Image (cartoon, helix red, strand yellow):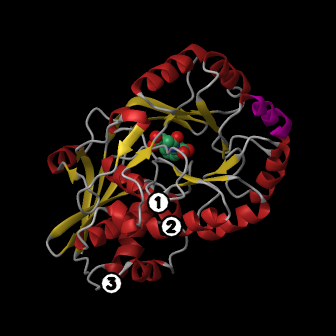
């Protein structure tokens, strides 16, 4: 299949509620969309890079420049039989997984459509609905946190993840447990702690958390291993796992007992699949993370989460948790048992609302 041109665009989308993590507060999301033109058909993908270099060094701006300057010139106009060939062309560019993943995932969607299969089936998925959870940002008060959890439980979410940081951790989790002793609960620290905090974090052990996500720095597998030895709560790694090699090393070191896979963070579906398999062979479950995606990235995450070793609910909430109006049709909705049904149409399985995308666009360029 030959990619004739790629359109890059940045949208400006307001989140229904500001999202606060240990990195800061996010009110607007600026998703970078890619549209591959192949044989007169459009195939959409989404780059999950953030506005600033906090979660990762990549940003919307760096992804745009790397795509335009380095990744796209090598692939446009070339006949590509499969994703391996695309990965080979991208390999000389060091890092920049989010930029690479946007093209890899859109291209995989195109391959699925060409094979007349829904993306989930094309990837080897084994389920027709995925279990989802909701990720709740840091709130101003404990009452607001409890209210937010209450309303998400009422909507049907079965797994609650809360963001923590020093000063908003043991007390906040304790208050949740007092009110909701039984819910499936986990905490995400986004690297806000150091190994010196091990004794403090061990106080979380009494709350029976499903896991503690990314307590320490992204590059620090050794300290994560030391911390895991001191905690009963399973550590889940997110930012630390950028590749299959990272996953292998983390598991060898005992740095985690769970892995969060975000296809954008690791360069796309193929590397996600490799991480999924490494974890599966080690008996370690994975789940699909979220990056406040539009329906395009969400469709990709839902498809990925149908693979067999995605054994825990993902951060794949319904469209209505983020946006007044999603850019795809149909939007993703929460169904019975806190699940989201997997689209059954060919390719990514949702239709992009081009008029809405047009209205939200703040920057656009076509690379030929
Ligand atoms: O539901 O998409 C979602 C958000 C899930 O908490 C979530 N994502 O650290 O995993 C994370 C966090 C995040 C969001 C990180 C946006 C960076 C940007």
| Nearer to the camera, 283 or 9 | 283
Quarter occupied by the C terminus: bottom left
Up the image or down, 354 lies above or below 74; here it is above
Which element type, helix, strand or loop, lies under badge 3?
Answer: loop
Residue appearing at x 40%, y 54% in the figure: 127
Extreme-top residue of the structure: 143
Kindly check if marks 1 and 2 are in contact, taking CB atoms under 8 A apart as contact.
Answer: yes
Tell me residue 240's x, y (percent): 65, 57
Q: Residue tagged by mark 1?
A: 307
Q: Residue tagged by mark 2?
A: 273
Left or right: 125 as drawn, with respect to 243: left
Q: Count every numbered label the image shows and give the total.
A: 3
Q: Which mark is residue 81?
A: 3
Left or right: 241 as drawn, with respect to 152: right
Tell me residue 250's x, y (percent): 71, 62
Residue appearing at x 40%, y 79% in the figure: 86
User: Is residue 47 visible to the viewer in this orientation of the structure?
Assistant: no
In the figure, residue 154 lies in which quadrant? Answer: top left
Quarter occupied by the N terminus: bottom left
Callout 3 environment at 10 Å: few (<14), some (14 to 19), or many (20+)? Answer: few
* Magenta span dominant secondary structure: helix
Q: Give the range drawn in magenta.
A: 197-206
Kindly check if marks 3 and 2 are in contact, taking CB atoms under 8 A apart as contact.
Answer: no
Tell me residue 48's x, y (percent): 43, 53
Up the image or down, 178 lies above or below 129; here it is above
Up the image or down, 285 lies above or below 210; here it is below
Callout 1 environment at 10 Å: few (<14), some (14 to 19), or many (20+)? Answer: many
């Amino acid at each position: 299949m030959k990619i004739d041109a790629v359109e890059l665009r940045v949208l400006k989308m307001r989140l229904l509620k500001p999202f606060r993590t240990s990195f800061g507060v996010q009110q607007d999301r600026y998703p970078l969309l890619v549209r591959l033109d192949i044989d007169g058909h459009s195939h959409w993908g989404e780059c999950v890079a953030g506005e600033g270099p906090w979660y990762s060094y990549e940003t919307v701006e760096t992804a745009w420049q790397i795509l335009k300057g380095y990744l796209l010139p090598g692939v446009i106009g070339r006949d590509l039989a499969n994703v391996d060939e695309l990965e080979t062309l991208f390999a000389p560019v060091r890092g920049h997984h989010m930029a690479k993943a946007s093209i890899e995932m859109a291209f995989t969607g195109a391959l699925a459509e060409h094979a007349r299969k829904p993306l989930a089936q094309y990837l080897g998925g084994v389920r027709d609905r995925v279990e989802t959870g909701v990720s709740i940002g840091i709130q101003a008060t404990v009452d607001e946190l409890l209210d937010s959890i209450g309303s998400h439980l009422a909507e049907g979410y079965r797994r609650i993840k809360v963001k923590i940081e020093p000063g908003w951790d043991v007390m906040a989790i304790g208050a949740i447990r007092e009110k909701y002793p039984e819910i499936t609960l986990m905490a995400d620290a986004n690297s806000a702690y150091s190994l010196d905090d091990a004794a403090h974090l061990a106080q979380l052990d009494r709350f029976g958390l499903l896991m503690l996500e990314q307590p320490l720095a992204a590059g620090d597998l050794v300290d994560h291993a030391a911390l895991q030895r001191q905690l009963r709560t399973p550590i889940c790694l997110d930012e630390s796992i950028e590749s299959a090699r990272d996953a292998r090393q983390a598991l060898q070191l005992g740095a985690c007992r769970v892995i969060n896979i975000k296809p954008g963070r690791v360069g796309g579906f193929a590397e996600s699949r490799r991480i999924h398999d490494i974890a599966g062979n080690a008996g370690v479950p994975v789940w699909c993370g979220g990056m406040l995606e539009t329906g395009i990235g969400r469709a990709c995450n839902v498809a990925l989460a149908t693979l067999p070793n995605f054994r825990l609910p993902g951060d794949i909430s319904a469209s209505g948790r983020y946006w007044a109006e999603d850019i795809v049709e149909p939007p993703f909705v929460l169904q019975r048992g806190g699940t989201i049904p997997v689209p059954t149409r060919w390719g990514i399985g949702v239709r992009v609302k081009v008029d809405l995308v047009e209205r939200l666009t703040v920057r656009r360029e076509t690379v030929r």
